[in-house]
């Protein structure tokens, strides 16, 4: 696979990347409901540890808190941590703004990527890459364009996509593919991919998976949020976590995702003796 070779070369050229460990400890997160003005607890004690070299998947019913977890890890405003901690390499990141977390190697591919009119995709990528480098080691225009070219061809993307404003007018699938382009260009240590497969046709799903797999290695870890076991056939995770009602209720290997696909969440909930209402109950 050419992408794999390119990325390895890239990493060698850029020197060795350090290992990273992300720990979520007893995380409780509340949001303020703007309509009722009341506070609602979404995450109710999430525990999760992952490090570079590992691929983790999180599955769970709608509205369970998966995106809340990813946005909180990345530091989006509006999510209030009321208890617990998030550590990167042993250091709490709770007081760090989003850009500082990104500089330290965290990356989030959002479930609903935002449109940024006025900033081209290529400009955004260069700024994002350079934000992780010190002033003396900014990427040269030549290196940037070569890296962009390699990754565009790996992802079967047209060059014209990079001259368009970020995500503006991109189709659902194009946005998702573009998130993976960002991943390949920025080369974070730990990436959270929130429903990177939603809305993708089968060919795009394969391309996106190829992109993520090309990053696999000891310097990269990913937390993949998905509703569909099918994605995990292409990107085989080391660990699968099931989240329900703001907590991780079960951990397992890839076989856990297959079991969920076959039995749904109701089966697991009943097996665990949890008292959580699920949409399946109505069927
Ligand atoms: N800013 C907010 N104000 C009010 N409620 C919110 C806010 N953000 C999240 N929630 C609520 O928190 C719950 C969890 O949402 P979240 O987006 O984390 O779920 P999810 O597990 O990612 O679901 P899905 O699988 O549908 O993407 C939902 O009930 C949602 O409505
Ligand atoms: Mg979500």
Image (cartoon, rainbow, N blue to C red):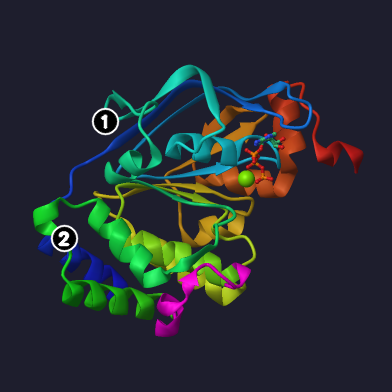
Write the residue at 42% across / 21% down: 85
Q: Is residue 241 visible?
A: yes
Residue drawn at x 50%, y 71% is 206
Residue 89 disc label: 1
Ligand 2 rendered quadrant:
top right
Identify the residue at the far right of this view.
282
Quadrant housing residue 190: top left
Residue 74: % across, % down: 44, 39
86 and 141: which one is in front? 141
Front label number (1 vs 2): 2
Quarter of image, res 44:
top right
* Quadrant position of the C terminus in the picture: top right
Query: In the image shown, does 14 or 49 lie closer to the viewer?
Result: 14
Please provide percent x and percent y for residue 154: 37, 76
Residue at 91% from the left image edge and 39% from the top image edge: 282
Is 269 situated above or below 280?
above
The residue tagged 2 is 138
The answer to whether the beta carbon of the residue marked 1 is less than 8 Å from any atom of ligand 1 is no
Q: Say whether marks 1 and 2 touch (CB < 8 Å).
A: no
User: Residue placed farthest to the front in the image?
Assistant: 118
Query: Can residue 15 be seen in the rendering of this structure?
Result: no
257 on left or right of 50 = right
Q: Over which residues does the magenta segment extend?
A: 157-172
Magenta stretch holds residue 162: yes
- N-terminal of the pair, mark 1 or mark 2, is 1
Residue density around tag 2, few if under 14, some if 14–19, many if 20 or more, within 10 Å: some
- Residue 241 position in % (x across, y down): 53, 37
What whole-number distance in Å separates the C-alpha atoms at marks 1 and 2?
A: 25 Å
Compared across the picture, whether 168 is left or right of 104 comes to right
* SS state under label 2: loop
Query: Could you tell me which residue is drawn at 26 percent across and 38 percent down?
Result: 20
Relative to 214, does residue 98 appear above or below in the rendering? above
């Amino acid at each position: 696979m050419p992408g794999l070779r390119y990325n390895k070369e890239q990493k060698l050229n850029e020197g060795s990347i350090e290992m990273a460990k992300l720990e979520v400890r007893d995380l409780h997160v509340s949001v303020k409901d703007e309509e009722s003005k009341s506070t609602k607890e979404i995450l109710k004690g999430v525990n999760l540890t992952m490090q570079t070299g590992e691929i983790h998947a999180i599955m769970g019913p709608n509205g369970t808190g998966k995106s809340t977890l990813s946005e909180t890890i990345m530091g989006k405003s509006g999510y209030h941590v009321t208890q617990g901690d998030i550590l990167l390499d042993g250091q709490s990141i709770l007081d760090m703004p989003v850009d500082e977390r990104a500089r330290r190697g965290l990356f989030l591919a959002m479930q609903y990527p935002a449109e940024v009119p006025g900033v081209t995709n290529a400009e955004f990528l260069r700024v994002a890459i350079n934000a992780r480098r010190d002033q003396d080691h900014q990427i040269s225009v030549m290196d940037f364009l070569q890296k962009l070219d390699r990754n565009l061809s790996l992802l079967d993307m047209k060059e014209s996509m990079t001259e368009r404003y970020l995500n503006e007018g991109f189709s659902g699938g194009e946005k998702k593919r573009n998130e993976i382009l960002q991943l390949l260009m920025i080369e974070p240590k730990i990436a959270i991919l929130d429903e990177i497969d939603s809305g993708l046709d089968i060919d795009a799903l394969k391309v996106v998976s190829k992109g993520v797999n090309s990053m696999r290695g000891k310097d990269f870890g990913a937390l993949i949020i998905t509703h569909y076991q099918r994605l995990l056939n292409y990107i085989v995770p080391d660990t699968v976590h099931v989240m329900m009602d703001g907590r991780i209720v079960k951990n397992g290997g890839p076989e856990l995702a297959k079991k969920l696909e076959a039995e749904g969440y109701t089966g697991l909930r009943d097996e665990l003796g949890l008292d959580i209402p699920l949409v399946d109950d109505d069927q």
